[in-house]
Image: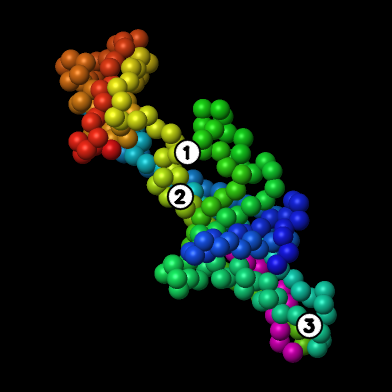
Amino acid sequence: MAAPKPGQASLKILWSKGGAEEIPVQYNPSELQFEKQAQYAEINIPGLIAPLQQFVRGGAEVLTVELFFDTSDKGTGVQAEAVTTLTDQVMAAALIEPSGHAPPPVIFKWGSGFPGSKLPKNQSGQQRSEFKGVITSFRQSFTFWSRSGLPLRAKLNLTIREYLPLNEQLKRLNPSSPDRTHGHVLAEGEALHRLAHDYYLQSGEWRRIALDNAIEDPRRLTPGRRLRIPRIPIGSGAA
């Protein structure tokens, strides 16, 4: 199979046995849609005008794209070539792979300047030059046929949901290690549960910080105060 040309979009299939197959997109899509959501929990504190918003976790990003394929340039008579010779290669990524017991992950690639490749420096670990995910929705529309009934033109609508194994997520986020002691200077509006999430990845560990710093009322924190963020020994049960 020919490699994609410079500036040509492609879909790489990551087969479970370690092989990868890159499928060039015949025509670059006219539109890409990315959707990213985040889950927040409301923390109700008496006396406030609104509940606090506690970040819980990020949602999987979703890429929606429409691909167009056409083999009608080879004619519509006996010499016609079915467009499924191209579209079935993409369809394979939406089907269960017997050796992996699930559809394989895919990578959508398209040139430089990919959305997410120019993030700020403090989020550089989350920069990307491609989109890795699994196909959760696959719709085919055949719109033109040869005289003998061969499909010659098709549109494929793909929904690809972000796929990131745990080790890859931790590498990108580079969170502070919970088994080391840290120092933190309080900023205006910061809360202990937020610090516990940032340093331990568990907001419920805010009591550990309060006890170590002799904080009696976690709702009354003085900006500029330096706090000691105690280590959590490995194997203590916290993340």
The reply, left or right, for residue 200 in relation to residue 22 is left
Please check the rendered image and state whether residue 157 is part of the magenta-colored stretch, yes or no: yes
Residue 76, above or below 177 = below
- Sequence-first disc among 3 and 2: 3
Q: Amino acid at mark 1?
A: Arg
The label number, if any, that marks residue 172 in the structure image = 1
| Residue corresponding to mark 3 | 80
Q: Secondary structure at mark 3?
A: loop
Mark toward the start of the polypeptide (1 vs 2): 2
- Give the main secondary structure, helix, strand or loop, of the magenta stretch: strand
Rendered residue at 76%/74% (across/down): 71
Q: Spatial distance from mark 3 to mark 2, Cα to Cα?
A: 41 Å
Which residue was labeled with disc 2? 164
Q: Is residue 165 above or below residue 54?
A: below
Q: Position of residue 75 (x, y in %)?
A: 83, 80
Height in image: 199 above or below 148? above
Which residue shows up at 70% across the image and 47% down it? Answer: 111
Q: Amino acid at mark 2?
A: Leu
Nearest the viewer among 118 and 21 is 21
- Can residue 144 be seen? no
Q: Which quadrant is the C terminus positioned in? A: top left
Asked whether the beta carbons under mark 1 and mark 2 sit within 8 Å of each other, the answer is yes
At a point 71% along the width and 80% down the height, the residue shown is: 82
Instruction: Find residue 62 and report its horizontal and vertical position in percent.
Output: 51, 52
Q: Which residues are magenta?
A: 148-159
- Marks 3/1: CA–CA distance: 48 Å
